[in-house]
Amino acid sequence: MIYEINQERLLKTLQELIETPSVVGYYPCIHQLLEELVEPYGLTVDYDRRHTAYVKISGQNPEKTVCLGAHFDTIGMVVRSIEENGWLSVRNLGGLNFHSLEGENVLVHTRFNGDYTGMVICKSHSVHVFDDARELERDFPNMKILIDEDVHDKTSVEALGIRPGDLISVDPKFVLTDTGYIKSRHIDDKASAAVLIECIRILVENGLQPKNNIWFAFPIYEEIGLGGAYVPDEVEEYLALDIGLIGHEQSGDEKKVSISGADRIAPYDWDLTSRLIELAEENDIDYVTDIYYRYGSDATAALNGGNNIVPATIGMGTMNSHGYERTHIDGIVETLKLSMAYIMDSK
């Protein structure tokens, strides 16, 4: 199968997705962007009650539906309380690593009064002032949000419309290097979402009809383990796209696509995973196989939710996961090629 991969467009979409805030549970902005991205191709977006977005393309065989999913949500924080000095006490949404967050810029999303900028600080924030500035554990309850407004008490912060339950997203700081590396927060899992959107474009632009109905799903609760917990009854196979891991005893590579055999919850389906390996080899796709023992995906979340689906997971190798992450355009392209091979070959 021959089709053109528009890397410039793929990277532009990736940057747009990454720079659109979508911390766990905060979906208004990212849903609007998705609708704008697929509208030129004559497609619409459907939503379930959990605010998972779906883009659907009909296949030659209307009796079978398979789903490719990439979660829109990113790790972040939620306001727990407003302290008397005007700082925000927070709790995590997903697997935060505060050692990589100190000093980062954030957006506080209020329900009725817009967004406010701020920054992540440690309560012992200065080596010139605090004896324990270097040693104090960077975790709750020592990490706070400092709002970029002239507020120095609880009442003044409340007057801004900030309240407990407001969500907080972290500035991604997207960088594309001349050598093809992407450095940014939220590569997990915006890179996979960009892949799926490019798959949609390729199918429509080339008049390609997959063998089966294809649903592209974009959950908003994956980082807390609930993204794929519900899957519509029509779906028989669920291929989750999520980052591959790099490190000790991991096979991942930033320039390759990882095919996962298992994660911390369960092994992935034997037959479907084997078929993905065969497709990678048949199509000269640069891949590795791997397992993830500290990691779960929407596919195994779907199993945990009792869904009657066949699960598998693939994704581009990514450094420094849940921190300031890095991957390479080659790994994203290899993930795209394997996704397209699966879409056109699904039996």
Image: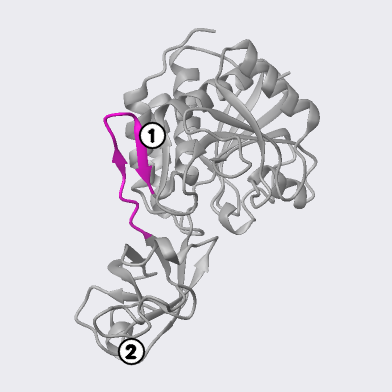
User: How many other residues sit within 10 Å of disc 1, few (<14), some (14-19) or many (≥20)?
Assistant: some
Residue indicated by mark 2: 154
Residue type, numbered disc 2:
Lys
Question: Does residue 204 belong to the magenta stretch?
Answer: no
Comparing 296 with 213, the one in front is 296
**Range shown magenta:** 170-184
Q: Is residue 14 above or below residue 274?
A: below
Q: Of helix, strand and loop, which one carries label 2? A: helix
Q: Is residue 304 above or below residue 70?
A: below
Question: Does residue 181 belong to the magenta stretch?
Answer: yes
Q: Which mark is residue 37?
A: 1
* Label 1, label 2: how far apart the Cα atoms are: 41 Å
Residue 43 appears in the figure: no
Quadrant including the N terminus: top right
Coloring scheme of the render? one colour
Residue 119 locus on image (x, y percent): 30, 69
Q: Report if the CB atoms under discs 1 and 2 are less than 8 Å apart.
A: no
Q: Is residue 20 above or below residue 153?
A: above
Q: Quadrant of residue 241?
A: top right
Q: Of helix, strand and loop, which one carries label 1? A: helix
Which residue is found at the position 72% from the left and 21% from the top? Answer: 275
**Lower sequence index among marks 1 and 2:** 1
Q: Quadrant of residue 105?
A: bottom left
Quadrant including the C terminus: top right
